[in-house]
Each structure stands twice: as structure tokens, then as C-alpha cells.
Amino acid sequence: MSDINNLPADILKQVNQCAAVLRSGGIAAYPTDTVYGLGADVHNDKAVNKIFTVKLRPLNLPLPVLISDMSQLNVLTADIPPLAKRLMAEFWPGGLTIIFDRARDFNSVALSGGNKVAVRMPGHTITLRLIKEAGCPIVGTSANQHGLPSVLTAAEVREQLGSEIDFILDGGTCPGGVESTVVDITVNPPVILRKGAIPEKEILDMINRSC
């Protein structure tokens, strides 16, 4: 993964435009290491609600959150157990989403009223720079309507979501093509809720070594 401070000028221009949209309460699509994501400032409930609406996503299905550094994780959860630290050291940045207990003072429509938060640090330079420029964790759900296939290009985002979103950051084709693996570490034993980019065996091996 290249340096987030050395993006091509045309890409950096898009990143700055997209970050401005997110800071102003808009929603935007962007490339990640897995599939194109649809994002908003996780603290802006109006913007997050718009994501539920645009995706036709049931309000009882929480939205995951993307971060660019560990200081942002500390805003979302107050409990980072040893297993989580080992998983993050091994698979972040990358295609692993970890479900934590939310911090007591963190509330967002993205949580769907629950007490857990799903977090990922993506392994994509553009995404990490976008989150950094936005200055906040952002929603990290796939940029497609609920129940339809995930999308890998900006053109596919336009085809599914069209003019319903405020900005599309065109960073080319996503290299991964498979959504992130999701593991819930708030339960004992931890549970893999969705198979994805990180092989299930690698996660289970680390969990078993931690038991």
C-alpha cells in the first residue's frame, strides 16, 4: 500500500472534494480494498439516515464504520480486548471488520439502536486519505442497493444509485472484489458472522491460539 500523502494530483483533488461533501453532511461513494463503499460522517444522523434510504436498507441492520487510525477507534469503543489487538495487528489495514462493544458516549443512527459497532481500517490508500481529510470515522457500507451485488467500479455505482448520492470518488476498479470478513469479538467464543476477504481459517486459527 502506497503512502497516503503521495496520491496523484487528480485523485487527491477528488479526495478533497469528497471529504468536503462528507463534512458538509452529504453522502458519497468511494473505492476501498474490497468493494466500493457508501459513506457519511458517522456522527451526522441525517446523513446516515440518507444512506439507509438510498440503499433501501432496513433500519434494523447496523452500518459498519471505517477508520483511518487508532485514535478514531478509541472514539467508537472503550473496550479493545487482547484478541482484538492481535487481529488488528495481523489484518489491519485490510479486509477484516471487527465488532466491538460501543463506547458509552458514542451514539449514531448507524448502530440501529444497538450497543455494538462494526469497525474496519481499510487497506486502500485513497480510502484512508479520504477518512483522514474528512476528519471523522465514516460509514463503510457497500455502495449498492440492499440485496443487489456489491459493485467494483464507479460506473456500477452510478448504475445502481445514480443521482441519489452527492459525490462519487472514481478511484478505478476495486482490487478485492469480495466484501470484508466480519468477526464478533463481543461474544465468547468469538463468531465469524460473514465470510469474506480474509480466509475464515486464518481468523479461526488466531481465535483458537488465543483461547
Image (cartoon, rainbow, N blue to C red):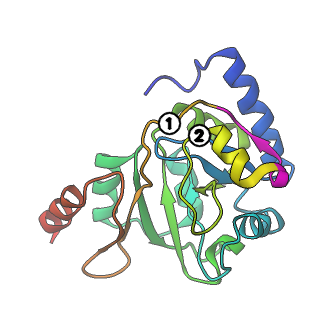
Q: Nearer the viewer, mark 2 or mark 1?
A: 2
Residue 31's label in the rendered image is 2
Numbered label attached to residue 147:
none
115 versus 167 height, above or below:
below
How many residues crowd around disc 2 within 10 Å: few (fewer than 14), some, or many (20 or more)? many
Q: Is residue 43 above or below residue 159?
A: below
Instruction: Please state which amino acid type lies under the numbered disc 1.
Output: His
**x and y percent of residue 79 in the render?**
44, 70
Location of mark 1 (residue): 124
Residue 76: where, in percent of width, then height?
A: 57, 64
In magenta stretch: residue 13? no
Region rendered in magenta: 163-170
Q: CA distance from mark 2 to mark 1?
A: 8 Å
Crowd rating for badge 1 (residues with CA inside 10 Å; few <14, some 14–19, many 20+): many
Residue appearing at x 29%, y 63% in the figure: 82
Do the CB atoms of the residues marked 2 and 1 lie less than 8 Å apart?
Answer: yes
Q: Position of residue 100 (x, y in %)?
A: 45, 70
Name the residue at 74% across, 48% down: 28
